[in-house]
């Protein structure tokens, strides 16, 4: 079953047809979401009532567009803030992890490596509740001892950030490690021979080499944080990120406003992903 | 110099230990302890297994638990069966530009939030949705058909959501299979089926295991798809965890549920690794 082995025409036609069907299945829900963002109707369903931009720019009831819907805009801001914090934290720890596992031999390294991988196989909702339980144990303990109420340990943005950070760090570590393994150590040694100290050598030689992976990890972390639902759901307080805000609206019934938000999300994340791919290809 | 290296080592070790300790290990131990607690009266608690007793004796809880496990396994198998021919096509049949384009097309839905994907399926499948309208238009139905809120719909959503995580590892492992090995298989008189069984599948095994583990995990821990596409009386285990924690504030029972889900996923992942003689490090790292 490779092109050099002759196959009957019927077989090739069926196989090709199957692959085409698969890609239709893949594209169908996304296409439908995008198309109905432009339907001039109260509901994202047939019949088609004509084309409109109102779900983006409309400023009158009932068709208030995304850009005039304050709740949605605020949620986008919250998501962007959370994603930026998560990306910064997880890429920082990911980088230190990569150096640690790449450069040092120590007792318990294998065990630590497996522990580092674990967040990938813990369901997101379990990560969420375990952090919720622990932070509330801490908060209650501090209250019992010092009669102080630490608001930050109750569900809210800090916990959302920590919850997402807890598993996105693993992914950042893997992305950065993969590139660090390809680094030629003699380059660093050359810098040392030329009189640079360790830190300078790493800063001027190794980190620039790692830059594509670090930027790739930032983009991946940002996107994963932006679309995370399960972990966030358990830790969210009064400021809801976008996915949670949209979920709450969806439960009340959907309007093409949600299609418009979704379409913008698709465009935004594809653009970001494309940028990351192009950047990595260039280097 | 040696001292400096030691300091550097400790500086690199600290973030890792803080992250794993404070956000992964201690919280899970705390969750386990909470699940082993029984409220006797206001502010008075005792260690006991009563939460697990409740979880294992109440038929609704047990049924949901088993159902979630079975449906997740089923979703994993279906995803594998659908993805394998496609991955093979991308890796071995398509060449050059087409290969790259097809691979990129597989990646796009992954960058779109799960909520949007599920929402798309709702628009397609609801009573006033596209497919219902299409069926009426063709004449296969004479009134609106509700396709949402069944197990089959939920399965479509689950498979869709995790498809990418099966396709990518499969494409990667299949690409590393040399065409000449397949040709040799045919030269030695193998049929298409025996080549598939004895050369292609064994070679793709690492990708199959990696894909199956990730897809199984994602299905088991999925909340959105079962809540939005599944029927009213077809609970998913994550929904029960959410209900105990957020709706009923019964954290002890919720923690027990969470721990049961964790054990279930660990056992199945461990089992799959054991069965194929691979380690977590090889599969995930």
Image (tube, coloured by chain):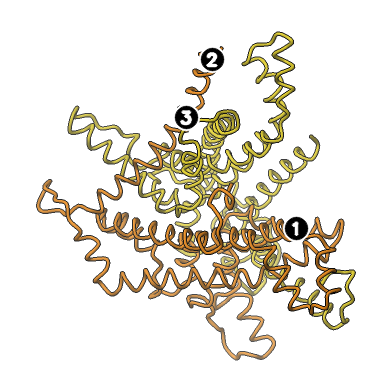
Chain colours: A yellow, B orange
Count residues near mark 2 (Cα–Cα under 10 Å), then give few for <14, some for 14-19, many for 20+: few
- Going from N to C along the chain, the mark reached first, 1 or 3, is 3
Q: Specify the quadrant that holds the N terminus of chain A.
A: bottom right
Which residue has dot 2 on it?
Answer: B2
Query: For the residues carrying marks 1 and 3, which lies nearer the camera in this image?
Result: 3
Secondary structure type for disc 3? helix
| Image coords of residue A151 (percent x, y) | 31, 34
* Residue visible at 83% across and 66% down in the picture: B93
* Residue visible at 34% across and 60% down in the picture: B260
Query: How far apart are labels 3 and 2 at the CA level?
Result: 21 Å
- Going from N to C along the chain, the mark reached first, 1 or 2, is 2
Q: Looking at this view, is B184 or B130 the one in front? A: B184
Count residues near mark 3 (Cα–Cα under 10 Å), then give few for <14, some for 14-19, many for 20+: some
| Image coords of residue B13 (percent x, y) | 48, 28
Which residue has dot 3 on it?
Answer: B15
Whether residue B240 sits left or right of residue B109 in the image: it is left
On whether disc 1 and disc 2 are found on a single subunit, the reply is yes
| Image coords of residue A98 (percent x, y) | 58, 33
Q: Which chain contains the residue that carries disc 3? A: B
- Going from N to C along the chain, the mark reached first, 3 or 2, is 2
Q: Which chain contains the residue that carries disc 1? A: B
Q: Are circles 1 and 3 on residues that touch, CB within 8 Å?
A: no
Q: Residue A140 carries which label?
A: none
Which residue has dot 1 on it?
Answer: B103
* Residue visible at 73% across and 45% down in the picture: A274
Whether residue B129 sits left or right of residue A127 in the image: it is right
Q: Specify the quadrant that holds the C terminus of chain A.
A: top right
Q: Looking at this view, is A89 or B127 the one in front? A: A89
């Amino acid at each position: 079953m490779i092109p050099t082995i002759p196959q009957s025409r019927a077989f090739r036609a069926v196989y090709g047809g199957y692959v085409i069907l698969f890609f239709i299945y893949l594209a169908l829900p996304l296409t439908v979401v995008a198309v109905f963002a432009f339907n001039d109707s109260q509901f994202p369903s047939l019949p088609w009532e004509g084309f409109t931009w109102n779900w983006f720019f409309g400023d009158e009831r009932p068709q208030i567009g995304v850009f005039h819907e304050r709740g949605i805009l605020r949620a986008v801001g919250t998501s962007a803030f959370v994603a930026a914090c998560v990306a910064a934290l997880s890429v920082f720890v990911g980088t230190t992890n990569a150096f640690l596992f790449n450069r040092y031999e120590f007792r318990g390294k294998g065990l630590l490596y497996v522990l580092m991988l674990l967040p990938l196989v813990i369901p997101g909702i379990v990560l969420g509740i375990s952090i919720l339980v622990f932070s509330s144990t801490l908060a209650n303990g501090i209250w019992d001892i010092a009669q102080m109420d630490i608001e930050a340990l109750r569900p809210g943005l800090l916990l959302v950030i920590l919850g997402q950070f807890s598993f996105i760090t693993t992914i950042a570590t893997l992305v950065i490690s993969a590139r660090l393994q390809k680094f030629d150590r003699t380059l660093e040694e050359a810098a040392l021979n030329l009189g640079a100290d360790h830190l300078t050598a790493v800063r001027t030689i190794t980190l620039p080499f790692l830059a594509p992976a670090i930027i790739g990890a930032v983009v991946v972390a940002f996107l994963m944080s932006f679309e995370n639902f399960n972990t966030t759901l358990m830790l969210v307080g009064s400021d809801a990120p976008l996915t949670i805000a949209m979920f709450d609206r969806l439960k009340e019934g959907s309007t093409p406003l949600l299609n418009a938000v979704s379409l913008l999300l698709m465009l935004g994340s594809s653009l970001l992903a494309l940028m990351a791919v192009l950047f990595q290809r260039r280097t | 110099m040696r001292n400096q290296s030691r300091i550097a080592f400790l500086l690199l070790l600290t973030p890792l230990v803080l992250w794993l300790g404070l956000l992964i290990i201690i919280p899970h131990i705390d969750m386990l302890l909470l699940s082993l607690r029984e409220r006797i009266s206001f502010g008075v608690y005792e260690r006991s297994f009563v939460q697990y007793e409740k979880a294992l004796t109440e038929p609704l809880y047990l049924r949901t638990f088993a159902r979630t496990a079975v449906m997740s396994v089923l979703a994993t198998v279906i995803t594998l069966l659908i993805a394998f021919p496609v991955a093979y096509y991308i890796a071995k049949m398509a060449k050059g530009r087409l290969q790259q384009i097809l691979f990129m097309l597989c990646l796009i839905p992954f960058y779109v939030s799960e909520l949007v994907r599920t929402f798309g399926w709702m628009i397609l499948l609801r009573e006033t949705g596209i497919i219902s309208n299409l069926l009426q238009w063709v004449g296969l139905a004479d009134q609106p058909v509700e396709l949402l809120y069944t197990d089959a719909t939920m399965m479509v959503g689950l498979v869709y959501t995790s498809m990418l995580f099966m396709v990518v590892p499969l494409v990667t492992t299949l690409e590393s299979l040399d065409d000449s090995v397949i040709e040799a298989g045919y030269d030695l008189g193998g049929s298409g089926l025996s080549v598939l069984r004895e050369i292609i599948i064994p070679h793709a095994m690492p990708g199959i295991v990696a894909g199956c583990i990730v897809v199984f995990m994602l299905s088991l821990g999925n909340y959105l798809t079962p809540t939005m596409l599944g029927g009213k009386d077809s609970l998913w285990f994550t929904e029960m965890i959410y209900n105990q924690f957020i709706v009923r504030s019964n954290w002890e029972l919720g923690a027990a549920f969470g721990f049961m889900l964790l054990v279930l996923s660990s056992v199945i992942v461990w089992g799959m690794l054991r069965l194929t003689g691979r380690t977590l490090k090889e599969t995930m790292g």
